[in-house]
Image (cartoon, rainbow, N blue to C red):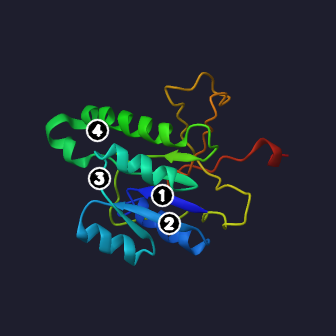
Amino acid sequence: MRVFVAGGTGHSGSYIIPELVAAGHEVTALARSDTAAAAVSTLGAKVHLGDLQDLDGLKEAAADSDGVIHVAHRQDLLPSGGIDAVAAAELPIMLAYGEALAGTGKPLVAAGSIGSPGNLGRPPRTTRPFPSATSTGAPCGPVTSWRPPWSASPSGECGHRSCGLPTSHTAPPIIPASSRS
């Protein structure tokens, strides 16, 4: 699977890329500088030069992939506009991905860690790795879901589907109903 990752050099993304590569996926990651490009390459991903303000570039990268993982945010907006500005900047990004992926059935996974304790010293990993490229299973863990504004219903009648990734190192995993006794 060809996966586009935005935020690949961040706290979450720098874990995500090596897991995807190890599972056999071809990863391309957004890099806004030569330093970020070098870091993305070191993690095993191809580089897509650009930034979160380049909506056409994000649409192109999404369209060229089999799925998108977005774990980035406009950190530059925090000092002047705070979390409200960061959240407002996410909407056009999500709409750009939605436009590129509409009707394709390709997944978009969006997660963030703004407002989390941070733990930049990186706590021990407690989440399961991503499934292999040939697996049909999905990672299981606490998830946050989001319904895009263009979705007519939570069932995905608009052609979009939602999925989630573990978002916490401390919350217990969600056990699918089919696995409960």
The answer to whether the residues at label 1 and label 2 have Cβ atoms under 8 Å apart is yes
Q: Which numbered disc, 4 or 3, marks the residue closer to the eye?
A: 3
Identify which amino acid the numbered label 1 is placed on: Phe
Circle nearer the N terminus (4, 3): 3
**Residue in view at x 63 percent, y 27 percent:** 154
Horizontal placement of 68 versus 88: left or right?
right
Mark 2 = which residue?
27
- Spatial CA distance of label 3 from label 1 is 13 Å
- Spatial CA distance of label 4 from label 3 is 14 Å
The answer to whether the residues at label 1 and label 4 have Cβ atoms under 8 Å apart is no
Residue 15 image position (x, y, % from top left): 46, 66
The quadrant holding residue 177 is: top right
Circle nearer the N terminus (1, 2): 1
Residue 132 image position (x, y, % from top left): 67, 67
Circle nearer the N terminus (4, 2): 2
Question: Could you say which disc has been placed on residue 51 in the image?
Answer: 3
Circle nearer the N terminus (2, 3): 2
- Spatial CA distance of label 1 from label 2 is 6 Å
Identify which amino acid the numbered label 2 is placed on: Val
Residue 112 appears anywhere in the view: no
The kind of secondary structure element at disc 4 is helix
Identify which amino acid the numbered label 4 is placed on: Val
